[in-house]
Image: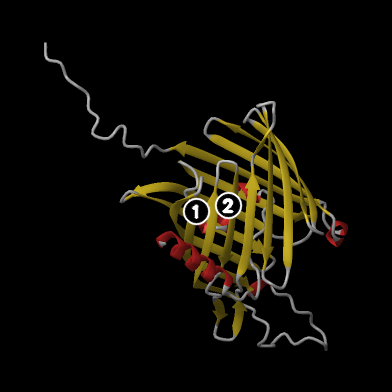
Amino acid sequence: MRKAKIILTGIFLLVTVRAVAQVDAQYSQYWALPTFYNAASAGRTDKLNLLATTRQQWIGMPDAPKTFMVCADMPLRFLNQNHGVGLIFSKETEGLFSNMVIGAQYAYKLKLWTGTLSLGIQLGMFDQKFDGTKVSIPSDDYHNSNDDAIPTTEMQKMVFDMGFGVFYNHKYFYAGLSANHLNEPTVTFEEKYETYIGRSYYFLGGGNIPFKNPLYELQPSVLVKTNLNITQVEITARLKYNKLFWGGLSYRWKDAMVIMIGAEYRNFIAGYAYDYPVSAIVKASSGSHEVFLGYSLKLDFSDKNKNKHKSIRIL
């Protein structure tokens, strides 16, 4: 009964919200960055996970988005209960705007059926910067360089930000629902310029399909993101060989085809993705590039080594 109440409360928080706008950065290798979308995925493995990624979007277009993100998460065992914690830092520059998110994540974990259900929350800050010193106003009869509606100074503001998510992890699949910018913060510059940050909703899911030949695995995944006005869907299929190398294709609906490759070796993982536009942007851009590098360290919270000591023999 206690588990059911927690689950119902989490779903209620997730679906009784209203979205307005979406400002989160875009990543093609979303399957490698679950904590970016859903705080409840923190501590989903028995490892300390560290990951950094960067993306250069729309090569050839002036002032196109550039993103950088670092995240870390790990499981915790406290009071005979499983938990997960994480940290995230994300920054995106686009034109004269720069958005930054800093967040701390916590996930409460419950055993459910043969997997683990997590309810997670992210608390942090959303920082927005606008460089008005680079605004160019033409000198003619149709433009007023002294118009107060056009900022001409560098402005920056930081506001409180939060997110919530539900995540289910199984040996063969995972799925999660989340809402970021749950409090819909408003960034106000000089009491006359405002940016309204609306909620972003995500569904992230994927699986692991083994073949008869144990050297190969198929890893499909899907990401749905929406602000209830605009919805975007990404579908990915990766083929993994010998738990070491992978290659894959992804399609972002009416936006891009993605080719990706990567490798894992011991505790390290790395991946690269190239986006080829299938929208009108192809006329101005040759595509987008994205890379990530990660490191994982296995943690042991078992009781088998507790109170274990070396015996000393005195001769």
Q: Residues within 10 Å of mark 1 (few under 14, many from 20)?
A: many
Give the secondary structure at mark 1.
Answer: strand
The residue indicated by pointer 1 is 117
Height in image: 167 above or below 239? below
Q: The residue tagged with tag 2: helix, strand or loop?
A: helix
Q: In the image, 83: left or right of 99?
A: left
The tag earlier along the polypeptide, 1 or 2, is 2
Could you tell whether 107 is left or right of 67 in the image?
A: left
Residue visible at 53% across and 61% down in the picture: 165
- Seen as rendered, the residue at the extreme top is 315
Amino acid type assigned to the residue bearing label 1 in the image:
Leu
Q: Kindly tell me whether residue 88 is visible in this rendering.
A: no
> Residue at 62% across / 31% down in the picture?
243
Residue at image x 39%, y 37%?
300
Instruction: Name the image quarter holding the C terminus.
Output: top left
Q: Is residue 275 left or right of residue 172?
A: right
What residue would you read off at disc 2?
A: 34
Residue 33 is situated, as x and y percent measured from the top left of the image, at 59, 50
